[in-house]
Amino acid sequence: MIALTNPIHVLRVLAPLVAVMLTASMTRGDDPAKPSTSTAPAPLDGRDGRDLALENFRPQSMLAVPVHHLPRAKFPVVDVHVHPRIRLHHSPEQLDDFVRTMDAHNIALCVSLDGGLGTALDEHLAYVWTKYRDRFVIFANIDWRGDGKADDPASWDCQRPDFARRMVAALEAAKVKGVSGLKVFKDLGLVFKNPDGSYIRIDDERWSPIWAACGRLGLPVIIHSGDPTAFFLPIDEKNERWEELHRHPEWSFHGPGFPKREDLLAAYLKIVERHPQTTFIGAHVSNNAEDLAAVASWLDTYPNLVVEIASRISELGRQPYTARKFFLKYADRILFGTDGPRAAGRLFPYWRFLETDDEYFAYAENPFPPQGLWNIYGIHLPDEVLKKVYHENAARIIPGVREKLAARK
C-alpha cells in the first residue's frame, strides 16, 4: 500500500480517476464547469408521443349507447357463494354491514361456504346465526391437513386410514346442526400433496365414502376444481390475462411442477359420474366459463351436475350471444353466486349483466378490471329465467333455502 502523505503521490493516484470522471461527463453531454444534474426518465403515460405502460392504460369508451344503472335485483336473490369467514374475518360489524348491503340489493339469502367441521363449525354457526339465522345457510368444509405440519404431508389427517370414516361421521353430525352442504376448495387437486410428492387427486378412491355420504344425507357438494385457462399458460405477450398474472404471479399454475388443467377437470367429472345420487355444484361455471360448449356437454351428460356463476360474469359477459343461449337452455341448472361478500360496486354489474341488454360496460368497480382487460354485455334474461337463476333453483337444490325464503315472505 502507498502512503498518501506526499502531495505528489496524491496527484498520481487521483489524476486517472479525475480523467475517467471527466470523460464520462463529456460522454453524457454534461458541462464539467456546471454542477451535475440527473434527468428523471420520461413517464410512460402515452402523452406527447411518449410510450404507454400497460398499467397506465385507462381507456374511456366513446360509445353512445343506452345505460341502465340498476340499484338492486329485480327479484329476490340467493347468493350461493359467499365467504364470511375468509373475507369478513368473523367481524360482527362487517357482517352487519354486509346484511345491510344484502337488504339494499334484494339479496334474500346467502350460502356461507366457510362452515368447517367440529369446533370450527360451531364457531361459524355462532358468528352467522346468532343474529342472522334467517339470512344464511351454511356449507361445511373438510380439513384435509388436521393438526399435521404444513410441510409434512405424511403427518396430515387425510393420510390416516380412518380419515374418510371420521369425515362421514362429522358430516352426519353437521347435518344435525343444520348444515346444508359441503364446499371443497381448489387446494384438493391443485395444491395438496401426498407424502411421495404427487398431488392429492379429487377422484382418489379414498374420498369416495365422503361423496357417497353427501348423496345419502342430501348435502350438495360445491367443488372448485382447477382455475381459468389463462392461469395454466405462460405469462407472456399472448396471455390475455397477463396484467392480472403480472400482479399476482402466485396465481399461475403453468409449468411441469403443476397438474394439467384438463386432468383436474377430468378428475372432478369422474366423481360426478361415480356418484349419481349426489348433487354436485360446479363452482365458477365449473371453472370453464371460457368454453360453454364443454360445460353444456357436461350438463347433458350428468343430471346430478349444476353450475353457479360466481366471479365469472367477466367471461360470460364478453360472449353475450353464447351465454344467453346457455342460460335459456339450462335455466334449471344455473345458480347465482358472487364469491362475496361483495361491496355494492361489485354487485351492480351482476344485475346489469343478467337483466339488461346494455353494451360494453365494466364488470367490476376497479379502475383496472381484475379479470381481463375487456368490458361485457348484458344478456337480458326473461323474467321466468331470472327467477330460476336468482332463487328458484337454489330453493330446489340446497336444503333450507326454500324454508328460509318462505319465512321471509
Image (cartoon, rainbow, N blue to C red):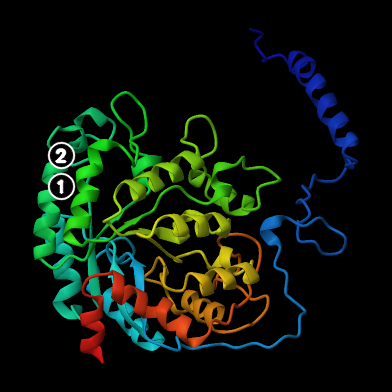
In the image, is residue 408 above or below residue 246? below
Q: Residue furthest top?
A: 1
Residue under label 1: 167
Left-right relation of 213 to 56 = left
- Image quarter in which the N terminus is found: top right
The one of 383 and 45 positioned closer to us in this rendering: 383
Check disc 1 and report its element: helix, strand or loop.
helix
Q: Is 157 left or right of 263, judged from the image as shown? A: left
Amino acid type of the residue that numbered disc 2 sits on in the rendered structure: Phe
Residue 207 location, quadrant: top left
In the image, what residue occupies the spot 76% across and 61% down? 45
Residue contact between numbered discs 1 and 2, judged by CB atoms under 8 Å: yes
Give the numbered dot on residue 228: none
Q: Is residue 3 in view?
A: yes
Query: At which x and y percent is residue 313?
Result: 53, 68
Residue at numbered disc 2: 163
Residue 405 vs 225, above or below: the answer is below
Query: What amino acid is at disc 1?
Result: Met
Point out residue 245 in the picture as x, y percentages from the top left corner. 57, 49
Residue sitting at x 24%, y 49% = 211
